[in-house]
Image (cartoon, rainbow, N blue to C red):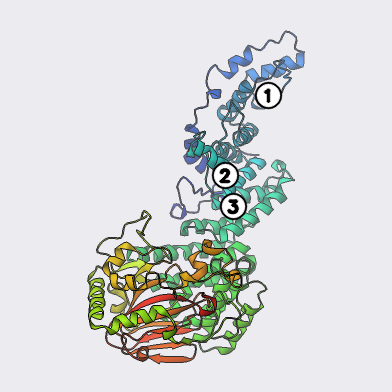
Amino acid sequence: MPMMVIWRVIGVSWMARNATSVIILLLFGIISQTYCQEKGKQMYNEFEHSVFQGASVLKRLSEIDMSDFTAEEKKFVELCQTGDADAIYAAARDIGKEKSVLLGKQDIEFSLSLYAFAADALDHPPSQGKLGKLFEQGVPPHLKRSTSAALHYYQKAGEHGHHSSLYNAGRLLARGMTEEDAAAIQSGEARPADFISVDLVGAMAYLQAAATLHMHYPEDTDESLTPLSIQSHGVVSASAAHADLTLRQMADAFIFGTLSEVNDNVDELWRDAVDHLIKFNDTFVATEGRVQDPVHMKGAAKFLHEIVHKHSDSLSSLQLYLALDNLNDMLGPLSGLDESYLPDAAKYALQLSSIELCMERYAATESDPACFNGAISAAVSYHRRAGDQDGATESWKVGKSHPNAATHWKTVLQTPRVYHENLTAKPWWDSSQFSAPSTLKALYENDVTRSQILKELDGVVRLQEGSLRMEEVILNTEGESPTRAVPSTEGLQRIFTPYIGIKNANAATAQEGAGGWSEFGPLFDGVNWSRERCAVVPTICDALRGDKSLCSERDISSENAAFVNSQAKKSTIWELCGSGTVVTILRLRPGTSILPHCGTTNARLIMHFPLIGSEGVKFVVGDETVMSYGGGDGHPIVFDDSFEHHVYHEGTEDRFVVLAVLGHPDLMK
């Protein structure tokens, strides 16, 4: 097989080049030298194994006593002495045996030196593959176990199409660090650099090469490895579909996520789509969510739509999933800006829910992965927003038909991602039966405490606002060290989620500060109260601290344990509340609409306690409407957000509410 390597250049801007992310360039299933030169050499240079030091290997070979050797054996040794790689490899195997023909005894250290000489000095693929295996297993006390070094040698052999090494490199990258590796580091027997982390994209690249080697170089193929490589590539691809990949890693996953040649037209469309996705994301992050560039959203949606619409039959399962998933991420916000996108948003959310990689990622509880549940719930909402009741009903039926997902809904008006049957279901609840709204109402009706609450709220307004709130996290919590300190000037944060549409009456509202819909929180994440934020609004935090109506206080009895899929307090807050936020403060600016959507789960209820600005706010839950919170500022409402709901602020003053997630009464103590 020719040693010349032809590269398939994807483009440097697509590559994630760091110690744990390997982007390998492929053409005809052959690995390029780029990674080995830049990373493999770096890893190998860190090892200082004495076995590779000392006297010259060739000198030791010349010292072998050949007086009793046959002519054939002498010729073999002479080949070794002249640097014949195959002969040295065979000698290394012989000397590593208990009864060596060449030495008359076993000499593991000399055997390892011969393998290393053939692998490094002579670039011999079988020796490189063998050393990879030896490093992976370790040869105590001569050779410390190191998957980093093993990967280095598997990659070197893989450059030449060494089939088992291609497979083994992919296998190691897919596996990453094991418990045994972690224990060795913990005990001081090894260093973190001795082992590798999981890299699913790199694993797919090597397994793709191993699985397709027979198509281009059958003479170098181990027939037993081809089906194993194909199977492993499928398993890793399925894992990569739902892994936390960067955009650039995701771009490469599309290329390596197939065992067929990528159609040139698809390749070009994908490049164009990714270019728009990266530019949209870079702008979004740089402006902390103030700019959701419609040009790049529309550009990405256009190219992804063409891939899905015209080329679905030629795509692998992973490729179709990635195209649909990213298409849905663009169509969600676009449909909030322009209702003409709603039919496509509904169509492709439904299609996403129907493909295997999404259907098998279903949620039975709140903390489960929820591709199917989220996609089919979104499809129902998009159809309803578009006025397509027949489409909504058909999508609703698809949700009900899944054998395992918690989507066996009773009505198209209530389609949360996780639906628990046999819970009392009604859009609106009497707030007086819950302690949290009753406590706040009593405080608000007292002139002194109301004045204090509003004074503290004014302190929130005065803080610097505008950062982006996307993750369910709480910072600098009691009893724990913060991962990032909350700046003393950080106030309201812009809220963004692709599946909840936000529409602003004018561009200024969307651009200024934290935008039309923002949050000061969370104050409470279900476990800890935020020390920094509660220092700004202590009256609200003190009032709700320990409140028994909050979802975090939910009883986990034998009757409802199935709802949380856990035991006692080991249950996560997501399982109890369907959210990582339990108490927070929200602002809605005049002219802003939160478009129709359903919440996460029907195992909770939502309290809104309006502090100021409730006049003119139209609140629709299910098919029931409440104006101005039914009584203005200080009048709490409790609703089931698993019903479709939407909010329109038709007033003139910023609305501020305390939001609390309450436990469903059927599940409380």
Residue 236 is labelled as none
Q: Secondary structure at mark 3?
A: helix
Q: CA distance from mark 1 to mark 2?
A: 29 Å
Q: Secondary structure at mark 1?
A: loop
For mark 3, what is the residue? 204
Residue 88 location (% of width, % of height): 65, 24
**Between 167 and 648, which is closer to the camera in this rendering?**
648
- Identified at 53% across, 58% down, the residue is 243
Which residue in the rendered view is the most extreme toward the front? 669
Residue 360 location (% of width, % of height): 63, 66
Q: CA distance from mark 2 to mark 3?
A: 23 Å
As drawn, 541 above or below 2: below
Sequence-wise first label, 1 or 2? 1
For mark 2, what is the residue? 179
Residue 609 location (% of width, % of height): 35, 81
Q: Amino acid at mark 1?
A: Gly
As drawn, 643 above or below 297: below
